[in-house]
Amino acid sequence: MSEELRVSPIETRGLAGKRRFAMVVDTRRCIGCMACQVACKAEYDTPLGVNRTWVPYKVAGKYPNVKKHFLPRLCNHCDDPPCVRNCPVEATFKVEDGGFVLQRYERCIGCRSCMAACPYNARFMLPSHRTYTPITNVVDKCTFCFHRVTQNLVPACVQTCIGRARVFGDINDPNSEVSYLVANNPTQVLRPEEGTKPHVFYIGADRNHTEFGRDAYRKIEVMELERAAFKNHFKI
Amino acid sequence: MGEYVWFHDVSWHATYAIYFFVIGILAGLSFLSYGSWRTPALRPLREKAAYGSFGLLIIGGLLLIADLSQPMRFLNILNPAYLHFTSPLAWGAVNIVAFGISSVLYILALQKGDEAKGKLLALVTALLALGLPVYTGYDLTVHQSRPLWNTPIMPVLFVALAIASGSAVGSLIAGANAEAQKVLREYMLWSAGAVAVILVSIMGTTNYGGAASELTFMIMTTGTMGLLFIGVGFLAGSVAPAVMLYAPIGKSQGVLMISALLILIGSAALRYVILMGPQQLQTLY
């Protein structure tokens, strides 16, 4: 079978004449300063308790020989996104030129089907009250800073990253930095077994980070208490 | 443990489980109403099942709309320009509307006493009713990244649950009608047994499905979730009624009523756990 036949019609990676934006996250360079998270919050007025990008960490080793591993997370702008297939009203859609997976807020009915479909938990429900923005009660997510990229700027998180851990560009362009990094480094993607073909590539990601946390072994009652405390703290 | 857990919210809350429960009963009642045209013993249930089914459709529809965070935009899902047919919810919306229209026409035919139209509309309504548990199961099945949900047998389980819970409600409605109860006993026995067998197969494959599936199995079989799933849903709500109905005592009115109540409680618990259990893991990734 030829390569063309095996590619989903929605995919844009490697498509001649089309741009396909991707992000490379070099975890060896990430120091966990959370500047990306703050820059994203500032860019979008994202309310407390929800995030378009976030930086979970794990502490590996045994005291005193311990090390912190960071794994910045965001929407993976998949080439074959299950959230797009799952949205009943086409509120979630994929931009053919660029591969951005975006959301039409005015059309979203808030059924949360896309949230359930996303293997990366990259989507969240905007709370009913926001400080400066009237968009509420719809599903939101990272847009790869579509509005900035269309003005030849990089996403806010990339702009602010002090260690240059995040690199953004057109992976269909063989001369771009992301193409070079993906071609010349062993890269990982999150949950490749889902077949979503994510476009956030990690360099040096610890496999233990990309799997379910061991906290799943804890008692549900305890987790519920902690979750309630977390929500109460952020008033969500 | 030294790891920072990022709490994500579950996508679908308990309202959705109640909706699954209600829509299962309404589908089951529609099957019974159609069954009354083929099995004379069920004749006393014909109108009651049709009205009950339509009433539950209104309750279920309101629950579904209330669960949206933008309730008034439910009209978007009925807008042909917006409908996206790769989504199970779009099929569900079409199915629910078609079922509603068919139900109204069927009830009108029943009120007029039009036998020919009534029989035909009963068949159409029952076929559309079959689509309701199928689409709700399909709604979960398509989520490839969610353990337990992502199995093609999920719509079959939902159909079996619909027959079990619909027959249970039918049995409660039928009261002392011995002929109807005899038929309903068979329905409840086989559907409760089928639910138990499907649950065993689903949980077996979940436990052997890799890290995420194994963790889901652990979540669903321990603690409060385990009590609801294994205790209330599987043992009390499926195995116990099947055994009681199979035994000679299953013919008595009292045992039939107890079995019907157990099936209803069990099927409600199963819907809750099947919906919420796999999402517990999702919140931790």
Image (cartoon, coloured by chain):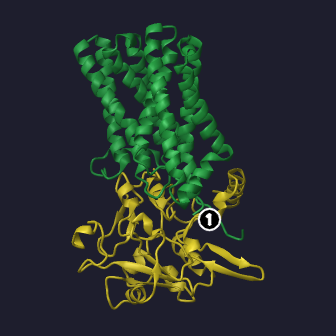
Q: Helix or strand or loop: what does disc 1 sit on?
A: loop
Which lettered chain is shown in yellow? A
Residue A74 higher or lower than B210, as above or below: below
Question: Does any portion of residue B213 appear in the rendered image?
Answer: yes
Q: Colour of chain B?
A: green
Q: Is residue B166 visible?
A: no
The quarter holding residue B232 reads: top right
Mark 1 lies on residue: A213
At a point 34% along the width and 25% down the height, the residue shown is B103
- Where's the C terminus of chain B, which quadrant? bottom right
Residue sitting farthest toward the right: A64
Q: Residues within 10 Å of mark 1 (few under 14, many from 20)?
A: some
Placement of the N terminus of chain B among the 4 image quadrants: bottom right
Q: Nearer the viewer, residue A49 or B283?
A: B283
Which residue is found at the position 29% from the left and 66% from the top? Answer: A10
- As displayed, is residue B38 above or below residue B58? above
Provide residue A32's location: percent of width, then percent of height: 63, 81
Residue shown at 32%/32% (left/top)? B128
- Residue A187 picture location, percent across and down: 46, 81
Q: Is B110 rendered above or below residue A223? A: above
The residue lying toward the viewer, choosing from A221 and A225, is A221
Q: Residue furthest toward the bottom?
A: A175
What amino acid does circle 1 point to? Gly
Left or right position of B284 against B81: right
Q: Position of residue A190 (x, y in %)?
A: 48, 71
Which residue is located at x 25 percent, y 12 percent? Answer: B114
- Taking B115 as reference, is B144 left or right? right
Tag 1 subunit: A
Q: How many marks?
A: 1
Of B54 and B201, nearer the camera is B201
